[in-house]
Structure formats: structure tokens, C-alpha cells
Amino acid sequence: MSEPTATTTIVYRPLGGMDGYRVVSDRASRVVVHAFPLADLAAVASAGLLAGGCAYILAGGGMAYIGESGRPMRRLAEHASDSAKSFARDAFVVCGCDGAAFDKSLGLDFQFRLTKEAIDAGAVTVAKGANPIRPDLPPADRSTHDRIYADALRLLHDARCTIFTGGGSPENGSEGHGPPPSSETSTSDAGDSADSGPMAIGVSAMPVAGEAFELRYCSLWASTGTATSATTETRSTAGTSFRRSSSRR
């Protein structure tokens, strides 16, 4: 079996910032994923980068809707005003890169495949109107779609769409943050009970006689392998006297 091939994913943020609109691509692939909060639809439209045939995913609240369109901005605007799609928080639009636009058969095929993928994963409830129908394609076209679809799934993952892997958040069905940490400590991670409390460094955690203390490290350990002493100085800010304690490592 051959080794997995390394891949490179490019994340472009047309509107800047750390969150919001992301265009996720791979120069070795003809597919691109546009990902953004549905509330940013007007700003995404103003960027003018999203047009042509596509398949798309609306996700949020543990639900997802998957469709296809030749005019994605108009179709998404219709969904944004549809009370039946009020669960949607995030949009993921799968389309072709420059010079390789999706035709109708690709959009319909991807709508079918993505819907089946989401249902099989079981991470979200898939809202559907009519069941998507897989287009009848010649074998040569179907094999091409297979290659493009594999790239699309990878780029959707990199765009933080996790409805196909079961890692979606119950709140939005898109970005997966995993379950909340348990309040109980497992026995395998508990360690020695002496290590479970705050680290003691020889200075009282409470002010003495109403005074505040300043902690200063006065030297470092040598990096030559020879242990040298490190000292910690505790000085009262209310007086001029100080106390120095040394420890060896």
C-alpha cells in the first residue's frame, strides 16, 4: 500500500481578521470551499468571489441542510430569510476554482454525496425537502467526480465543517470543540496527590500582618550540566528588610 500523499491547504481571508469569511483551497485541486457565518452574507457578497455552480451546506443547532445552485448568493439569501432554515449559523459552499467552474451535474452529484455522507456520519440531523437524486453519469465523468469529491471533503474538514466526522458541536453542528471536560479526574491522569495542589515555593500565600510581598528570581540554572544554586528573594513592600532562601537542583 502506498504512503499517504502530503497535501497543502491554503486559507485566504478576503475580509481579514481571524474569524469570519474563509476561502479554503489547494492549488493541486480544482475545488474551493467558501466558509462563513450566514450572518456575514452581505459582506461575503460584496467581496464578489462567490459565483457559479456549487453545492452548499447550512449548519447549526445540531442540524444541516445540503443543497445545490447555479446562483449561490441568491439562494443563500433566500435560505437566510426562510424560517425553516433558522437553525443555520454557518455556510460552506463547495465550488470550482477559477477556470474550472462546477457544471449542473457536479452540483447535483455533490448534493447527493454530501447528503448521504452526513446521514451516514450521524453527527447532525439532516433537513431535507425532496430526496437528492444522483445524476446518471458515464463512468469517465463519475471517476472525475470521485477525485474532486475526495478533495472537497478534505477542504471542508480544513474549513472546520465537521458534520461528516461526528465531531461537530451540539450548538452549531459545524466547528467541533469536543465534549466539555469532566469535573472528575481520571485515575490514570491523577498522579501523586502531592502534585495535585498548588505548588509551594516557601512563601506564604496570605499577606503577613497586612503586608504585601514581591517575589523575585535572582539567578538561573546553568545550561552546562553543572547544577548551580538558584535563589528566591522575598521582600516586604512595607519595610526595608528582606529574606533570601536558597534551593539546589
Image: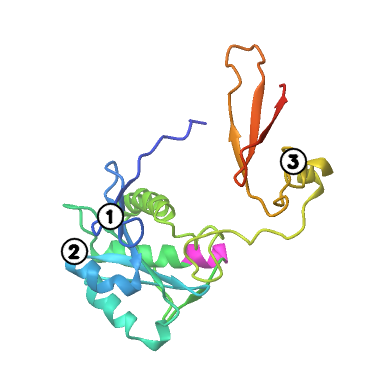
Amino acid beneath label 2: Ala
Q: Is residue 246 left or right of residue 10?
A: right
Q: Position of residue 213 (x, y in %)?
A: 63, 45
Residue at 25 percent of width and 71 percent of height = 72
In the image, the segment drawn in magenta is 116-122
Q: Earlier in the sequence, mark 1 or mark 2?
A: 1
Residue 182 relative to residue 90: left or right: right
Asked whether 175 or 221 is in front, the reply is 221
Q: Nearer the viewer, residue 131 or 127?
A: 127
Distance between mark 3 and mark 2 Cα atoms: 56 Å
Q: Which mark is residue 156?
A: none
* Residue 215 vertical placement versus 86 (above, below): above
Question: Residue flagged by tag 1: what amino acid is it?
Answer: Arg
Q: Please state the horizontal and vertical placement of residue 66, each as a whole percent of the image.
A: 40, 71
Q: Which mark is residue 13?
A: 1
Kindly check if marks 3 and 1 are in contact, taking CB atoms under 8 A apart as contact.
Answer: no
